[in-house]
Image (cartoon, coloured by chain):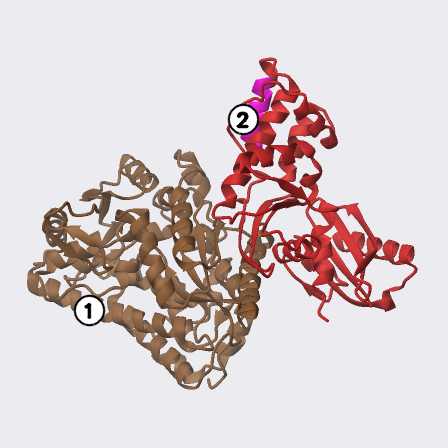
Chain colours: A red, B brown
Amino acid sequence: MLVAGVDAGSRAVKLILWDRSKSQSLASGMLDQGVHQDALANDLLDRLLSQAGCSRGDLRGVVATGYGRNIVGFADRTITEITCHARGVRHVLPEVRTVIDIGGQDCKVIHLDEQGNVYDFSMNDRCAAGSGRFLEMVATRLDVSLDRLAELSRASTDPAAISSMCVVFAETEIVGLLATGTPPEDIVAGVLNSLARRVAGMIGRTKDGPVVFTGGAAQIGGLVTALEVALERPVIVAPEPQMTGALGAALSVPQ
Amino acid sequence: MNTAPAKITLAEWEVRYEHCGANRSSVPYVGPLSRHVRDGDARLPKLRYDNSLAALRLWNFVLSEEDRLHEARLAGKSIVGTMKDLGTVPVIAYATPNLVAFYPDGAWWTPCIMEDSTGLLPVADALGLGENFCPVRAMAGAFVTRAHFPIPDALVCSVGATCDDFSAIAQRLEGLGYPIVWWEIPHRRQPSRGEEAVTLATSCEAPVALVRHVSAELQRIREILQELSGFPINDESLTRSIRKANRIRTLLRNVRQRAFTAEPCPLPALEVLLAEMLAIHFCSDQAEAEAVLSDLLRTTQARVARRQGVLPEGAVRVFWVNPVADLRVMNVLEECGGRLCGTDFLFGHAIQPIPEDIPPMEALARMALADPMVGTSEDRALGICAEAARLGAEAVIISRIPGASHCAYEGRAIKAIVQERLDVPVVELEVPPLCDALMPALRTRIEAVVETVRETRKSCL
C-alpha cells in the first residue's frame, strides 16, 4: 500500500513515497522551496510517482509536515514537524531518546519517552539563531559553500569566540573578525562551537542516552563534532537526515 | 437568542446582533462590534468571538472605555491614571464618588487592536523608546498624540520592584511634562529568621516591616487622591470600596473556575483574558464591571448546567502564563485543539479577595505585596506550579512579551521549575503585538504541544 510524506520546510520540500506493506521507501526526493510552494510539492510528487512507476490513484494517504504543511493541497492531514521527526527517528533508531533537528528556519530539541513518543520539546526563538539560515549567512559572508564548512572547521587551530547567535549581530562579529585578519577556518569553528553550545543549552533535562541529529544541518560534519564536544556524548546522524520529517509524515498516515 | 454556544466571526456577530431584538436595549454599552472597527479597531475582523450576549457586552464594555473616560470628564469627575498598578490604587480611587481610575498601561494593546493604524509605536520610537522596550511604550505615544484616552488629572505610578523598562517609560513621560506621583513597592523578600511576617493572599509570606512600608506609601497616595477629589477617603469608605472590589473578584474567580474546569469548555480563552482585565481597574466603571461579570457568570453557569461548550470535548488542557500581545493567539490555541485550564496573566493577586478583617490600608498593602512581579521568579513559578497542578494542566505555555524586561529571563526560570515539578510539556512563545507573519511558527509550537499531550494520553491508555 502506497502512502506519502511531505516535509514542506522553509528551505526545501522533501517527499517520500512509502510502501507500507514492505515498510520501505519506493522513492524520495527534494526541491528547493520557492514562492509557489504547492506547485513545487505537486511537481515533486509527480516526479517521484513516475520514478516509482505509480500514479496518484495508487496513493492511499498523504501527510504533510513542515512550515508549509498547510499549503500542500494534496495532503489528507497535517502534523507538526516535531511529531514527524520523532516518528521518523523512532523508525530508524528506536533506542534514541533525544533528537536535535536543525532545519532552515529553526532548531528543535525533542525528548522521547520509552515508547518513542514526544514528551517535551524546545525550539529556538523566532529569530534565525541556531538555524540552517544562520549557517548559510556564515558561508555567504566567508564566500564558501555550506558543504565546505566542515572541512574549514577541521583546519582551525584557534577557534574564534563568537558571542552572538543573532544572525545580524553575528554577521557584525564576523565582519570584525575578518577585518582583524582572523582566518576563515577559525571563524567557522567558532561559529559551530557557539551554535553547539546553544543547542546544548536547549537540551536541558535530557536523560542519558544517544542523541540523534536530523535536518539539513546534520550534514555539516563540523557541527556534529562541535555538538559531541558540547554535549559530551556521541551524536548519531540520522540516515538521510534531511528526509527524517518526510519519513515521519509518511509513517503517520493513518492505517 | 437560544442559539447553542459557539465561536463566531465578526461578520456572523453582525447578523446575530440584528436578531438580538429587545435584549440589546436593556444593556449598557451594547452595540454591534463593527462600530469599533469603524473607530479603527482593525484587528477585530480577524478574531473569533463567543456568541453570547454576555460576551458581546464584555467586548463592548472593554472597547468603549475611552468614551467612558471622556464622559466622566464631562460629568466633572477627575481621572486618575494608575500606572504600573495591578489592582491596588484603583480601590482607593473608587472610595470616592468623583474619581475614575484608569490604567494607561493598557495602551500596550492599542497597536494590536488597531493594527498600529494610529502610529503610536513610531511616536514612541521618536521619543527614544524603541523596540527594545516593552510594548507599553505605546502608552507614551498615546500621551503625545492625545488621540485615545483623555489625559488624566493625576498620574500615580509604583516604582521599585517593577519592570525596569516600564520605569524608564514612565520617567520619559514625566520628562515630557506629565507629573507623576511615585510610590515605592519594594521587592518582596523572604522574612528573616524570627522576623514578624504575614501570609499573603497568594500564599507567599512577607515581613510585617514591608507591609508597614507599603501601607505608609499607600497612605500618601490616599491623601493625594483625597485632595484631588475633595471628598474624604476614610476607613469606612475604603472598606466599602474593598467590599465592592471583592464582589467583582469573586465573580471573576467563579467565571474562571467554570471556564477552566467544566467539560466541554464553556467560555473561549479570549473572553477569559478579557474578563480578567476587569480585575485591574474595573475598566473605569466599577458598577458596570460587576454587571458584566455577573452576566458572564450566569451564561457560563447555564452552559455548564446544560453541558454545552464552545469547544469539542477533550481539548488539551493548557495553563497559560502571561498575557499575549496579539489577541489572535488566544483563538489559535483553540484552533489547534487546546483550551485554557488556568492562567497567570501577571496579576493573579488582583483576583484574590482583599482581607476585610484588618484595617483597609494594611489590607491593600498586603495585596500590593502579593503582586507576582514584586517577588522572585521562583515564587511566581511555584505559584504557577500549584495552580497548574490544581487545575489539571496537561501542558504549560509561557508567552513572552518582546521587550518586556520581566519576561526576558523569567520565562526560562519558570519553564525550568515547572518542568521539574510537573513533568508536563512546557513551551515558551514570543508574541509580538502583531504576529500575522509569525502565525505559522506560533501555530506549529502550539500544535506540537497539543500533539504531544495527545500522544501521552494514548500511551497512558
Q: Secondary structure at mark 2?
A: loop
Q: Confirm or deny contact between disc 1 and disc 2 (CB under 8 A).
A: no
Point out residue B191 in the picture as x, y percentages from the top left corner.
16, 47
Q: Which image quadrant is residue B232 in?
A: bottom left
Taking the magenta stretch, the answer to whether it contains residue A168 is yes
Circle 2 is placed at which residue position? A162
**Number of numbered discs on residues:** 2
Residue B444 left/right relative to B81? right
Q: Nearer the viewer, residue B233 or B165?
A: B165
Q: Position of residue B284 (x, y in %)?
A: 28, 61
CA neighbours of label 2 inside 10 A, class few (<14), some (14 to 19), many (20+)? many
Which residue is tagged 1? B244
Answer with the quarter of the image where residue B257 lies. bottom left
Q: Is residue B406 magenta?
A: no
Q: Chain of mark 2?
A: A
Magenta residues, dominant SS class: helix
**Which residue sits at x=18%, y=61%?**
B94
Q: Is residue B288 visible?
A: no
Measuring from the top left, give residue A161's x and y in whole percent.
53, 23
Q: Which quadrant of the figure contains the C terminus of chain B? A: bottom right
- Which chain letter matches label 1? B
Q: Nearer the viewer, mark 1 or mark 2?
A: 2
Q: Is residue B42 above or below residue A143?
A: below
Residue A126 visible at all: yes
Q: CA distance from mark 1 to mark 2?
A: 57 Å
Q: Which residues are magenta?
A: A166-177
Q: Residue at x 63, y 46 (%)?
A: A212
Residue B455 vs B445, above or below: the answer is below
